[in-house]
Amino acid sequence: MSMIDVKVSATGVEADFGTLPDRLHRLVYKTVSDLTTQLADRVRRKLSGEALHVISGDLRASFDQDVQDQGDQIVGKVFQSKDVPYARIHEYGGPITIPELPRKDFGVYHFTDSSGRDVFTKGPIRSHTINMPERSYLRSSLSEMRDEIIESLASAVSGSEIERS
């Protein structure tokens, strides 16, 4: 049997197997599929209130999963299938520039200041930059599952699981 190379990266889990017996190949495919589903579920949980508060549910609904069997490589991915403009700023954090907002004759602007207080104003509001904190949901989920992913794939490939399947 050739060497097996498993990589866990920010974009997914990749296992390079070379040539495997069919039964073992099916077991590894099932393991990668199960782990991919668990990772997608964890990301959706984080987007259901663990890391971010749900407002519209668009970000949570934008995630999908896929497993591809390319013969010598089985790739499980959890990915954003629909563009949600605020996804990146929540995952990585960073500066956001607020444009100048004119005075409102009717209605008010509402925001939370740096001390957490609600502010209501008619404006005008000067252009300014705020720092959005990182609220990782994707990278943190993969990091939390990293050891489980490696152990599950190692167990499947070691043959200890083959006898039971």
Image (cartoon, helix red, strand yellow):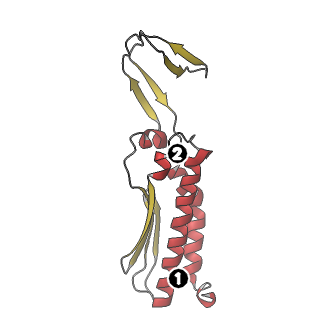
Q: Secondary structure at mark 2?
A: loop
In percent of width and height, residue 127 lies at: 38, 17
**Position above or below: 159 against 130:** below
Q: Secondary structure at mark 1?
A: helix
Amino acid at circle 2: Ser
Q: Quadrant of the C terminus?
A: bottom right
Q: Residue at x 60, y 66 (%)?
A: 148
In percent of width and height, residue 85 lies at: 38, 40
Left or right of residue 27: residue 98? left
Residue that numbered label 1 is attached to: 27
Q: Residue at x 56, y 67 (%)?
A: 149
Identify the mark nearer the N-term, 2 or 1.
1
Q: Are marks 2 and 1 in contact (CB under 8 Å)?
A: no
In percent of width and height, residue 134 lies at: 51, 38
Residue 136 disc label: 2
- Identify which residue, 26 or 20, lies in the foreground: 26
Name of the residue lying farthest toward the front: 106
Left or right of residue 132: residue 127? left
- Identify which residue, 104 or 34, lies in the foreground: 104
Task: Characterize the local packing of mark 2: few (<14), some (14-19) or many (20 or more) Cα atoms within 10 angstroms.
Answer: many
Q: Quadrant of the N terminus?
A: bottom left
Amino acid at circle 1: Leu
In percent of width and height, residue 110 lies at: 51, 20
